[in-house]
Image (spheres, rainbow, N blue to C red):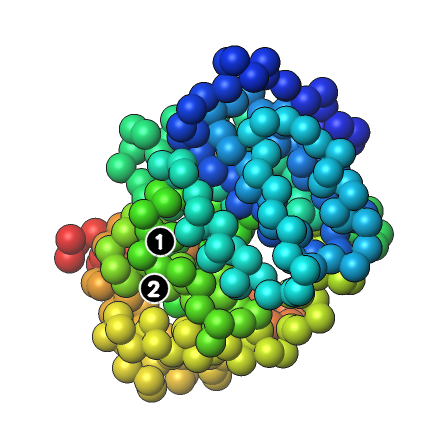
Amino acid sequence: MNDTSGLVKPIHLPEEKLPVMPLVTISMPAFNSERYIAEAIESVLAQTYTNFELIIVDDGSTDGTREIINRYQDARIIKIFSEKNQGLIATRNKIASIARGKYLALLDADDRAFPDRLQLQVDFLEKDGIDICGADHWTLNQGNGAIKPSKQRHSNADINALLTVCSPLCNPAIMGKLEVFKRFPYKTSYMHAEDYCLWTEIALAGYRFANIKKKLIVYRLHSTQTSVNYLQAARNVFSQAQTRYLQALGIPDFCFPQPLPFLQRLKMGVEFMVRINKCIPHISIGANCELYARFQFRGNGVWTPLNRLERLVIATYASLLGRAAS
């Protein structure tokens, strides 16, 4: 397991050795982030890969965030201070508009990257024909200190398929081609679920995704983050984007993923599984199990083993069907 305690020593380059044009731009929006941002910045400066620029935009913070940012004098850091709060979406788009790298890496001001994060993602993007690269990660609950590993799917097919029911990418673990983020800026109409909405747009445009099979960041959960405070609003926006994505894939409304009684899901759920696997070939059995689980009710008690068996049978059938159709 990667060490999640303490800070690693920053790597500071002499100015004469700094690259003229960075290959990677790291995007770090910040708003009232005084509690965590030093750790986030230090994790960037400690990267083994050094050909980057770090753009930090303080979005009108009213705490000590600005003072903490100004402690760092590394020439690779670009600091922008906004007097008024513009919002996360506008800030992210601003960073993408001025970025100089070939790749844009996302890291929130309350998260932390492991030292090999940039190197591994650059190597992956340079050789594998992928446009957007995520990774496995640790989730740290700041309230109780619990830390859990993510359960990611890694192939483009699995990610595209799981976008029908969830967001299978961890936003602050993303590195992707800057040209994609310039073509598809975050939209204010997708506020509070802008990441999921962006990934669906990019998927429908034919760009390719992957998640690296290694934990590259610590993703922090705490009571002040947007995803906690605007949960219902995020769910509403998610539902709208999910419907658009399903319709664009040719999935009819009557078999959208939803919990159904046994006989109904054998009809509607199997219909969905057949359609999605013909539309997106090579979905893994594991990902198909996650998809079909959305048609089953939770908390089934003594019926749980039978539900799991049902899920596995349908998932295996759907995966074989998808491979045969490709």
Who comes first in sequence, dot 2 or dot 1? Answer: 1
> For the point 51% across and 33% down, which residue is it?
53
Task: Sort mark 1 into few (<14), some (14-19) or many (20+) by Cα contacts within 10 Å.
Answer: some
Say which mark, if any, is on residue 201.
2
Answer yes or no: is residue 89 visible: yes
Residue 274's mark?
none
Query: Which residue type does callout 2 highlight?
Result: Glu
Q: Which mark is residue 182?
A: 1
Whether residue 238 is visible, yes or no, is: no
Q: Nearer the viewer, residue 283 or 156?
A: 156
Q: How far apart are marks 2 and 1 (CA)?
A: 13 Å
User: For the residues carrying marks 2 and 1, which lies nearer the camera in this image?
Assistant: 1
Quadrant position of residue 138: top right
Residue at 48 percent of width and 83 percent of height: 261
Number of other residues with Cα within 10 Å of mark 2, as a class: few under 14, some 14 to 19, many 20 or more: some
- Mark 1: amino acid: Lys
Where does the image place residue 221, in percent across and percent down from the top left? 71, 54
